[in-house]
Amino acid sequence: PLPDAIGRLLAFAFGPLLGIGFLGLFHLIATHRDGPALRFGVAFALMAGVAVTTMLVVQVGNNMFLESQLAAAESESVKEAARLAHRSVNQVQILIDVVWDIFICGAGICVGWAMLRHPGFGRVFGWSGIIASALLLYFNLDTFPMPPANAGSIDLGPLVAVWMLVVFARSLWLARQMKQAD
């Protein structure tokens, strides 16, 4: 296992790296077609990066605090009180997760729209991003304040994540093709 500080660094780097990835995607798409959808999408992605970093810091910090309380507890009743307090406080992290979903879905919808007429992405990438993001947002708002998975609904977060991974992989491939053409 990784040292705790390294594990936290990797987890907390996700949001900033997401923002950097979307800025790179902006430059790739904007060379063909720049517009408000692309710009709003990247702005939403940057806000999503801040939201997910906030969520992860709160989540990890709360869990670390609970562990220290449990280790210091002198009785089972004190441990149970700590667990109860943690469940209540953990709701904040769950609600910040909704903020992350709102902004990352906004990014997926807007950037997907910007991809529709891009020769390297087109309708398949564009519509799949729009639809997956819109559905994820719908299910999150439909089950609010509970996450869809906790409410017995469908969590499409992994689908949006796969779409983004494929988009970033495609972006790297397209950037390489453009560089070779120069």
Image (cartoon, rainbow, N blue to C red):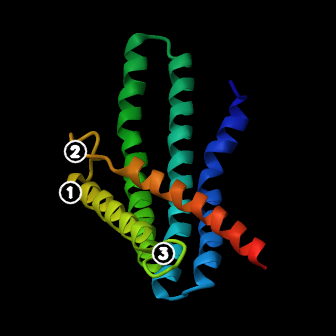
Dot in front, 1 or 2: 2
User: What is the crowding at mark 3: few (fewer than 14 residues within 10 Å), some, or many (at least 20)?
Assistant: many
Separation of disc 3 and disc 1 at Cα? 23 Å
Q: Amino acid at mark 1?
A: Asp
Answer whether labels 3 and 2 touch (C-beta < 8 Å): no
Residue 135's spot in the image, x, y percent?
A: 28, 60
**Quadrant in the rendering for residue 134:** bottom left
**Could you tell me which residue is drawn at 59 percent across and 83 percent down?**
30
Q: Earlier in the sequence, mark 3 or mark 1?
A: 3
Q: Is residue 143 left or right of residue 3?
A: left
Q: How dense is the environment of label 1, judged by Cα within 10 Å: few (below 14), some, or many (20 and up)?
A: some
Q: Earlier in the sequence, mark 1 or mark 2?
A: 1
Rounded to the nearest angstrom, the CA distance separating label 1 from label 2 is 9 Å
The numbered dot on residue 41 is 3
Q: Amino acid at mark 3?
A: Gly
13 relative to 171, above or below: above
Query: Which image quarter is the C terminus in?
Result: bottom right
Check disc 1 and report the residue beneath it. 142
